[in-house]
Amino acid sequence: MGDESALVEKPYIGKWISCIFRISQVFLDKCFSRYSIGSGHYAYLLFLYRHDNVTPDMISKYLNVDKGNTTRAIAKLESLGYVRREVVPEDRRSYRVLLTDSGRGLEPEIRQDLRHWGEMITHGFTAEEKQLAYSLLERMADNAIEFRESMMRQGHSETTPGEWQRIWRCTK
């Protein structure tokens, strides 16, 4: 007969990634609501905790988000007093984003909330399993980013998913 488990098709990996993402958004939205920010804003603050006084373009590139999202997030964080913008003297059209004392003061609480979430989703994992999970997810993200950049370099930004699959198979 053979191995019957081989006959059972595993769900698309995106199902699990999506599940974790959606539930994390709910959890983090509740945690961060006390600062009047949503789950989409903490990544900008985390970046600024490590790289303060940067341009929005640098933030967008690091977070792999479009400039419009970055502009809206910075405006929200600025309206709350967590960041401020300074015009770049060499280029009056550009500006840099800096943390305020208020924004810097959120760092321990935000990091604690994120640590708590990480502990909840890796509950029951050994230290090695946790390290492996993080490593594999990082590699998956790197692959996704490389795929997107490859498609952009080839001029396929408006390409449909089906065309991307065909192109990807041909380039491997």
Image: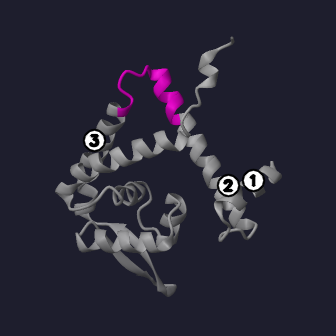
Q: Decide: is 120 above or below 94.
A: above
Tell me the amino acid under the disc marked 1: Trp
Between 121 and 47, the one nearer to me in the picture: 121
Give the Cα distance between marks 1 and 2.
Answer: 8 Å
Whether residue 114 can be seen here: yes
Range of the magenta residues?
121-134
Give the residue pinned by disc 2: 147
What is the residue that sits farthest to the front in this orientation?
1
Sequence order check, earlier mark of 1 and 2: 2
Tell me the amino acid under the disc marked 3: Gln
Give the residue pinned by disc 3: 112
Q: Position of residue 7 (x, y in %)?
A: 63, 24
Q: Which mark is residue 168?
A: 1
Q: Which mark is residue 60?
A: none
Circles 1 and 3: CB distance less than 8 Å? no
Using residue 149 as the reference point, say whether residue 32 is left or right of it: left
Sequence order check, earlier mark of 1 and 3: 3
Q: Secondary structure at mark 3?
A: helix
Q: Is residue 127 magenta?
A: yes
Between 120 and 104, the one nearer to me in the picture: 120
Q: Quadrant of residue 39?
A: bottom left
Give the Cα distance between marks 3 and 2.
Answer: 33 Å
